[in-house]
């Protein structure tokens, strides 16, 4: 199954004014996105001042490999022009105990679990979304994502 949703995690959070400027640039990318010369319908939005979510709307035409590459190239150029960069996919974002966004390389997740910093019910942002385009699967408790493999075998969820 081809995915039509891509999530980019920015290395630094955006201010309101930087987010507004970036959103304008992202709207221009979405409006000019094409596949083999045909316009594609898509949307690119900023969430939590930290994530850029690009979506193709497949009911209006499917993106080709080249159009996906051109989207990535346009995003890279736009990020660079705005002084932004994004993390590679090994970075996991989660909400800390106060509900603030935090992040760590997935390889240190077992240590964060052992310390109690992260647990089964910690809300994580799963960019794989179980290999679907359903954004309802993006922001979920850790025990409902691929990261559950790092939990002790006898833990599935902690009562709230």
Image (cartoon, rainbow, N blue to C red):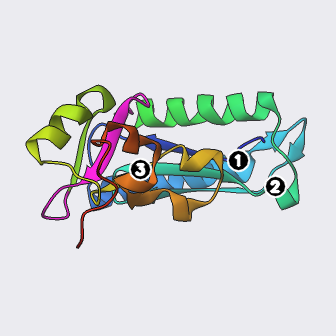
The earlier-in-sequence mark between 2 and 3 is: 3
> Which disc, if any, is residue 51?
3
Q: Quadrant of the C terminus?
A: bottom left
The answer to whether residue 114 is left or right of residue 45 is left
Q: In the current view of this chain or complex, which residue is farthest to the front?
A: 154
SS assignment at label 2: helix
Residue 77 is at least partly visible in this image: yes
The answer to whether residue 11 is left or right of residue 128 is left
Circle 2 packing at 10 Å, graded few (<14), some (14-19), many (20+), is few
Circle 1 packing at 10 Å, graded few (<14), some (14-19), many (20+), is some
SS assignment at label 3: strand
Disc number lying in front (1 or 3): 1
Q: In the current view of this chain or complex, which residue is farthest to the left?
A: 115
* Residue located beneath label 2 in the image: 58
The earlier-in-sequence mark between 2 and 1 is: 1
Residue 21 point in image, percent of width and height: 42, 54
Viewer-nearest residue: 25 or 142: 142
Residue 139 point in image, percent of width and height: 42, 59
**On screen, residue 108 above or below 22:** above
Residue 54 point in image, percent of width and height: 59, 49
Identify the main secondary structure in magenta: loop
Indicate yes or no whether the magenta region holds residue 53. Answer: no
Viewer-nearest residue: 27 or 11: 11
Give the CA distance from mark 2 to mark 1: 7 Å
The reply to whether discs 2 and 1 touch (Cβ–Cβ < 8 Å) is yes
Give the CA distance from mark 2 to mark 3: 22 Å
* Residue located beneath label 1 in the image: 4
Q: Quadrant of the N terminus?
A: top right
The residue lying at 13 percent from left, 64 percent from top is 98
The residue lying at 14 percent from left, 61 percent from top is 97
Counting every numbered tag in the picture gives 3
Where are the magenta residues, as a range?
Answer: 83-100
């Amino acid at each position: 199954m081809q995915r039509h949703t891509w999530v980019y995690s920015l290395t630094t959070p955006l201010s309101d004014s930087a987010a507004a400027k970036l959103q304008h640039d992202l709207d221009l990318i979405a409006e000019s996105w094409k596949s083999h010369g045909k316009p594609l319908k898509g949307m690119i939005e900023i969430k939590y001042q930290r994530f850029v979510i690009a979506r193709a709307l497949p009911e209006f035409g499917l993106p080709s490999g080249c159009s996906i590459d051109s989207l990535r190239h346009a995003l890279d150029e736009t990020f660079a022009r705005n002084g932004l960069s994004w993390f590679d996919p090994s970075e996991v974002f989660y909400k800390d105990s106060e509900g603030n966004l935090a992040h760590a390389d997935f390889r240190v997740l077992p240590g964060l679990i052992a310390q109690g910093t992260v647990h089964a019910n910690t809300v994580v942002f799963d960019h794989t979304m179980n290999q679907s385009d359903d954004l309802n699967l993006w922001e979920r408790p850790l025990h409902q994502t691929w990261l559950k493999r790092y939990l002790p075998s006898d833990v599935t969820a902690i009562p709230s």
